Amino acid sequence: EMLRVTGVQTCALPISDIHIQRRPQLTELFGKRFLGAANLYIAGRHDHFTPAAQEALVRALKAQQLDVVACTGDLTALATDEEFQAAKDLLGPIFAAQPSVIIPGNHDTYVAQAEAERWIERYFGEWTGEGDWPRLHQHGQVAFVGVDVCRHRPILSTGEIDAPQLQRLDALLGSPELNESFVFLMVHYPLRNRRGEPYGPDTRNIKNAAALEAVLAKHSARIGAVLHGHEHHGFRTKMPVSDGPDIDILNPGAGGYAHLPDKGRTAHFCIYTVADGHIAEVERFAFDGAEFVPEQGGAFASKG
């Protein structure tokens, strides 16, 4: 996701699900990574993501005047050292060009070792921050609160947020230090689908999403929007709140997806302009096979 600020405005660019791929070594094919590699390189899903889109994404971001870049995870496909290094080589200069915020995706914690040793922080720690989650990144009058719900699962792609992190999130969102801020809550997994219903299936969502939503609902007047990825088709929806304002939920779509017009799918990214305490403009760009261009029909006109 991307954010741009000009004067009293802030321009943020959100990106997600780049999925940099490098064929793993035989010695790396253990556990879930073996199944993932088979899915990519035997079942043929590796061509769903392409260097052409990933390199075009970098060119497009260089052309923008951005205040903040926010990445909601899945920089890699199988969380190998080679993939992390390739992602750092490609995207590091973009993240370094202005303030940037990164949270991990489930593919960045694909095996137990990558999660336990925080490999994403080894390569991108300058932008993930360190310490307990959630993590606060303040940029002028816009605050990014990063939540980590990604957990290594031997087979499934589900996430989970534990009670201590929920308690810290509740305290942070209620803190006076956010009184004057427009708050983006960053989480890799969707909370809601494009119809505004709880996100499923249960094999690839946040197991205790209702507990996270309960904390967010308590502070809904403070949260400007939730940014997420994981679902490769972009969409914009809302999380309903019974006794407060509904919360905007924004997913730009996968930033590294191949151009597959016959399937109605391609890569996307968004730019959100925040002004006077609200999102004043949403722009969405689509990969046309060569470069990223403004989405036809306006932001989120397509289901890709």
Image: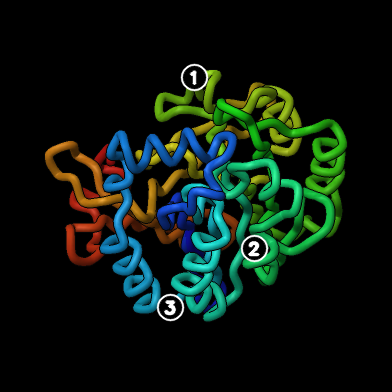
Image location (x, y in percent) of residue 78: 51, 47
The residue singled out by tag 3 in the image is 65
Is disc 2 placed on a helix, strand or loop?
Answer: strand
Which SS class for mark 1?
A: loop
Instruction: Determine which quarter of the picture holds residue 43.
Output: top left
Give left or right: position of 269 versus 177.
left
Decide: few, some or many residues near mark 2? Use Cα within 10 Å; few <14, some 14-19, many ≥20.
many
Please give the residue where the numbered disc 2 appears in the rendered image: 142
**Labels 1 and 2: the sequence-earlier one:** 2
Closer to the camera, 294 or 141? 294
Label 1 belongs to which residue? 201
Q: Is residue 230 left or right of residue 57?
A: right
CB within 8 Å, label 2 to label 3: no
Q: For the view shown, which residue lies furthest in the front direction?
A: 26
**Residue at the spot 63% in from the left edge and 31% down from the top edge:** 153
Query: In the image, residue 116 lies at what x, y percent?
Result: 75, 47
Which of the colour schemes (rainbow, by chain, secondary structure, one colour) is used?
A: rainbow
Q: Amino acid at mark 1?
A: Pro
* Res. 215 image quadrant: top right
Give the distance between the C-alpha atoms of the residues marked 2 and 3, in whole angstroms: 17 Å
Q: CA distance from mark 1 to mark 2?
A: 33 Å
Q: Residue at x 65, y 26 (%)?
A: 209
